[in-house]
Image (tube, rainbow, N blue to C red):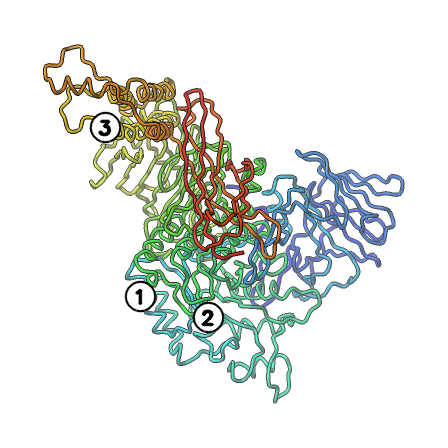
Amino acid sequence: MPQPSFRRLPVLAGALVLLIASLTPGRAAPEAPRHQIVEGHARFTVLAPDLIRMETSPAGRFIDEPSVAVLKRDWPAAAARVDRQDGWLVLATGKMTLRYKLDAAAFTAQTLAITWHDADGGHAWKPGDADGANLGGVVGDIAIRSKPVDNPGMLSRKGCFLLDDSHTPLRDTATRWIKPRPVKDGQDWYFFVYGRDFALMLRRFAELTGPVPMIPRYVLGAWFGSRANYAQNQWELIVDRFREEHLPLDMLVLDSLSWTNVVWSGYDFDAEQLPDPRGFIQGMLKKGVRTTFNEHFEPLTPQSDHNFDTMRKILGLPEGTKKVEHDLANQRYAEAFMNVLHKPLLDMGMAFWWQDGWAPAKMEGLDLLMWTREVEYEGQERLTGKRAFDFCRLGSWGSHRSGGFFSSDLIPQWNTLTMLVPFTQQGGNMLVPYVINLCGGVYGVNIEPELYQRWMQFSAFSPVFWMHGLWGLRLPWEYGEDGMAAYRKFVGLRYRLLPYTYTLTRQAHDTALPLVRGMYLDYPEQEPAYQARQQFMFGPDLLVAPVTEPGQGQPVLKSVFLPAGQEWYDFFTGRSYGGGQVLAYKCPLERLPLFVRAGAILPLAPPMDFSDQKPLDRLTLEVFASGRSAQYKLYEDDGLSLDYREGKFSWTGIDFTPRAADHVLTIHPAAGHYAGQPASRRYEIRIHGLVKPEAVALGASAIEEKPEDEEGTRWSWDNQARLTTIHLAEPLSIRKEVRVTLKEAGSHEDARLLQEVVEVRERLRKVKLEEKLKYAFLLHGQEHGKPPRVIRETEAVETALNDLVARPRGLAKNPPDFKALTGRVLRALSDRPFESARRIPELNDTCLSMTQTIAPAKFEPAELRKMTATLLGLELPARTVWDAPPFATVGPFLHVQARLDYDRACTGPATVAYELECPDEAGTGRSWIAGAPVARPDGMTQFDVQHPNPTRFGGHRFRVRALLNGSGGQAELSREVEWLSTALP
């Protein structure tokens, strides 16, 4: 893993001061960069071929000090070519060309233009250009919004971004504090060009403004809070219940109602609600739970804080002053703000502060949210000597350096959850990877159980998991056994994934790539990645498509885009799917659409009640085989201290290499050291996507195959899951290579074809059951000596498939002809299906009579349609969609969407036609009108329906019919879907 080319600025060392990168008192300012061009009122600095700084100043006073937002000034020289042509300055960097009208007073559309070329062709930009291709960002408060946020971020399909840093305060090198900009009417712009290399844009922006911080590992655990003014003993009872039920928990979030003497103001404890704050905080720590406290920034009064007089004197206010306003622009006050008001709780052991708002600061151009975060983040780091974390609402550019972003109070509705899916991934577009959403929202006492579980699934794969209600009823047991089961499954999985997720936090620190990212970040060249906003990547290996609509007891149909270039495994079922398609995925309530990229290696921790409960001396490796080699690097450190800045951390490389006959998993020696590092590990290795190996070896030593429930080092094969599990029970040194070999385990393509064989066989067995039921019906309970032709043919094909299942190695070299196999059964279904003549004469008269009786029998057309659809793998996912926006008057708003899925290996080339039968409004004189079917990008076919003002509330049923015509014959399938009319127009 490459190390960062920058590191966090050392700040607040000994006093609340901000040290400026590469600048200390008595040291001269850095020399002007080699390619810094001053032309009249303008200065241009080529920071990198893809990044130019552009300044104007009427007085010719340009800024060389860092600003509050932009930290890095000491850029290495970057090559550029400078010309002056016909009154224009022309500056070419190799990535872009800038043209500036000489002697212009300011940058305008008439005086400045930038052009560049990338894989999409030529592009141009000038000041004032709108960005209609922006991929979205986040805003500070979405509580009252009901649609996705369209605030622009730094990523755009236009491939460029302008940062305007003209008005932010500067970091003064002499006072080591902030100061207003001396130039009020100047421009200070940064222009980035990146094409579709979105990762470059994030990395470059972090290089300019500072890295994403390394967070404490416990932040990735589960948080619980409430505004229900719980007292100390109630919080203790809640935590005890979490531990009793083995429901993971790492954080308690105390709102002002639970701890402050004056609600929403000051830092004095409510002695009734929290009689022993130190004992409470320390008691929670003993149970593995950290605490954070809510603070507000109302003026201090003698009633709200016993330090009122101390703070009054610091500001030089007279006696008799009734209130003290915060002023974080005042250096002396800011120091006391941390040392006097915040230090006591930090000394008691609280984790960090929740800034619910911002503190005033009297300085022009200073963003109060961003500055409050920075003062508290750096102050906490100084006071504790450990990693800090902030969470509050979003500030301006630079806020990413100080922890998390709280998206504010949320309304517990389905449309809120729908909005949060793109919103959370768009945080990464603004270098805000730790978006914190309230699981289940705030308002309302209770929420419907289905929404509670679906929101929990989404939050389990959000950067931070936090449940926080207004008046309670967000705890898992308040939703019964189903609520606790969902919590154990999905939050438990979140905890098991901590080694993977924590590695992502280091990658975010090094590269600025967020944990939750839009599909376009990893797949910028694939067009569907830009439309798939209701799903995201959780790191590079996990694809999450949260369900954001109710199923009301039925599985929800979810469209899931699987990027091309690799296969994808369903995490919960183990089934693999080819990439480059949109699945019509039917998802029951107990499952989340979660897919793993083929070639991924996922490290899992053992089950835990809190993040630091157990050392990672037992590591599970989930290996998802593909036809290519796979690599992973596991990052580890102590999770809490600042030692990682001194190189105290470890990387462990893990490789999985497919070979002609054998497959090798190699765990390389750990590189690096840190406090608390385990010296050895036990491993469980679970390998998906291969066939059963002949043998397994650790180094040169064979491992014995034993049942799953036996102790000791062993390996086993799960025939149902098609999974090889290897238990290495003895501790192995992390400083030595561990090599596991699966011998004669076939190829991934063998395993993929085996999956197809098993699925075809399962469908065949369902058809055989229908055949036998018909056969039994024809016999009327009479004896018969020989099964009819259709059963004989079906069982012959079943036998052939059984042989393939029993000996799957080499399937890829000699793939089965599924079309021929299923065609054999299809012919028997329609051609003399119940013929049962014997070469040896039948001696039993009854059997002979029944042979003659059933010989002419046939399947009814409906029976044939059903069995043909089953055999060919026909499925018809369908749904109704009502998409009327508020106050709209032009429709249609009702749509019926359907898609016929089928096994192409069994059908050969085929076409599909669709029909829609609308409800019958008998006796009303009204009729429903369905438009012609139209193909959608997600593979669904859509009928737009004009409804005739339904005369009743409730369900209206549509019947969708799909007819398949293929080289193997015809098949059809129909399905009813319901639209629920909840109001009459």
- Answer with the quarter of the image where residue 79 lies: top right
- For badge 1, the amino acid type reads Asp
Residue carrying label 1:
240
Closer to the chain start, of discs 2 and 1, is 1
- For badge 2, the amino acid type reads Asp
Give the residue furthest to the bottom: 320
Q: Determine whether, in the image, residue 769 is placed left or right of residue 95.
A: left
Residue carrying label 3:
772
Q: Which residue is drawn at the image coordinates 45% and 27% (left, top)? A: 964
| Distance (Cα) linking label 3 and label 1 | 57 Å
Closer to the chain start, of discs 3 and 1, is 1
Mark 1, residues whose alpha carbon is within 10 Å: few (<14), some, or many (≥20)? some
Q: Select label 3 or label 1 by which is in front.
A: 3
The front one of 974 and 810 is 974
- For badge 3, the amino acid type reads Lys
User: In the figure, 783 relative to 116: above or below?
Assistant: above
Residue carrying label 2:
255
